[in-house]
Amino acid sequence: MTRTPRLDAPPLNGTASVHDRAPRVLVVDDSRLQRHILKASLKRWGYEVLEAESGHDAIGICKDIEPDMVISDWMMPGMNGLEFCKAFRAMDRESYGYFILLTSKSEKNEVAHGLDNGADDFLTKPVNAAELRARLNAGERILRMERELTEKNRLIKHALEKIQSLYYSIDSDLIEAKKLQQSLIRERFRDFGCAQVSLMLHPSGHVGGDLVGFFPVNETRIGLFSIDVSGHGISSALMTARLAGYLSSTAPEQNIAIRAIAGGGQDSISPARVVENLNRLVLDEMDTEHYFTLLLADVDLASGHVRMAQAGHPHPLVQRADGTIEQDGPGGLPVGLFPGASYEEFSVTLQPGDRLMIFSDGITECPDPDGVLLNEQGLESMLHRLADMRGTALLESVIWNLSEFAGNGDFPDDVSAVLFEYQRLAR
């Protein structure tokens, strides 16, 4: 049988949105009179109307154009309304279609059977116009909610795609930022002949707020420092980059811990005075809410004498050649909190075979899976076990042991350390 669709508005290949046109209703009935009666009411109510005299014809129409709602007779020759409903539900559609079955059946099990096969509603023949309009209004509300939900999902999907794109962009930038931050530590190890310096920097994320380093002052003196900027992430990392310039090992003229002396030489400035100057610089020249803890050491390679200033940083750890461990210091205020803060200088003298470790609180405040912190005693126990290890191998073992202590999870804070191992400068 030739399919003759009837459309009272756009052509079959029209693509107008339902928001730009009246709802489109497909009437399927083998009775021309019944179709005419329904069509007249639907057009009077402002609907666009399509007609089909069989389920097969209706499927063909639905392939060309998607009706918003379908009113189909149940009893038809060939493909009946229930079979057409099942085929309609199996079709690939951009949006939901509301399906009303016309039937003379009133038994509850028949109605349930129709619902199971995809019908949304039923009307008993002969059709009451007021009841039909009420059912169509209910269908329109459902379709409107479905389309609003679809539009919101589309907007959410679009927003998520943009967020994902931004995430990839930021992640790529952070990877590069991590490379740049790691490049601030130009040397992880240096052998001064009478002593060796090893550095460890392990950010908890892409970038972090810890910084460790050393700088030569002259032939017999070197400086060591460990910094922990408050917070995490990009802003903390930017501040570490600024601070690295103040304690540069490659540009002594910019290093605020070094002073020029008569005859063209260089000497170190008192660590306490350097920290006080840093406190003033941060408060006067940096527009930031960040502060940082710091331990700055001035080491005399000839005598093993170490002068230090502590600004809220963990106590330095000295492990003597016989394995005994000392941890002490005045504490002090973090840098960048209080104008005019003063800092106390303290010292320790290393003997051949002794070593000094300056570290961030990411080590001692690392928690185990139960939330118990490693603390200073835990670090001492770890170093007793690792007493025979040296240099970068020791620091790598500290990281490995710390990871094992934390349950092999990520560290919640940056982990960093400076290890100074002393022998004595040959005279």
Image (spheres, rainbow, N blue to C red):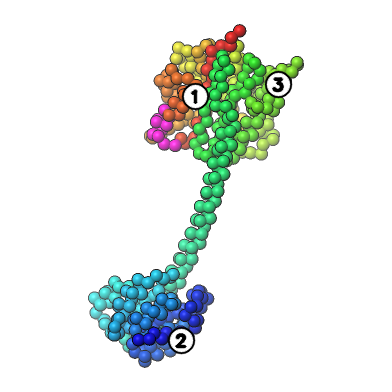
Kindly identify which residue carries mark 3: 259
CB of mark 2 within 8 Å of CB of mark 1?
A: no
- Asked which secondary structure carries label 1, the reply is helix
- Circle 1: residue type: Thr
As for residue 408 lying within the magenta part, the answer is yes
- Asked which secondary structure carries label 2, the reply is helix
Identify the image quadrant of residue 397: top left
As for residue 419 lying within the magenta part, the answer is no
Residue 283 at least partly seen: yes
Residue drawn where x is 43% and y is 29% of the image = 400
The number of numbered discs placed on residues in the rendered structure image is 3
Kindly identify which residue carries mark 2: 43
Q: In the image, 389: left or right of 122?
A: right
**The residue stretch that appears in magenta:** 401-410
Residue drawn where x is 46% and y is 27% of the image = 396
x and y, in percent, of residue 12 in the image: 47, 80
Residue drawn where x is 47% and y is 30% of the image = 365
Q: Any mark on residue 392, and which?
A: 1
Q: Few, some or many C-alpha atoms within 10 Å of disc 1 (few <14, some 14-19, many ≥20)? A: some
- Circle 3: residue type: Arg
- Asked which secondary structure carries label 3, the reply is strand
Residue drawn where x is 36% and y is 74% of the image = 88
Distance from the alpha carbon under mark 2 to that under mark 3: 94 Å
Residue 130 at least partly seen: no
Q: In the image, 322: left or right of 239?
A: left
Q: In the image, 301: left or right of 64?
A: right
Which of disc 3 and disc 2 is earlier in sequence?
Answer: 2
Q: Quadrant of the N terminus?
A: bottom left
Q: Nearer the viewer, mark 2 or mark 1?
A: 1
Residue 279 position (above or below residue 65)? above
x and y, in percent, of residue 102 in the image: 32, 82
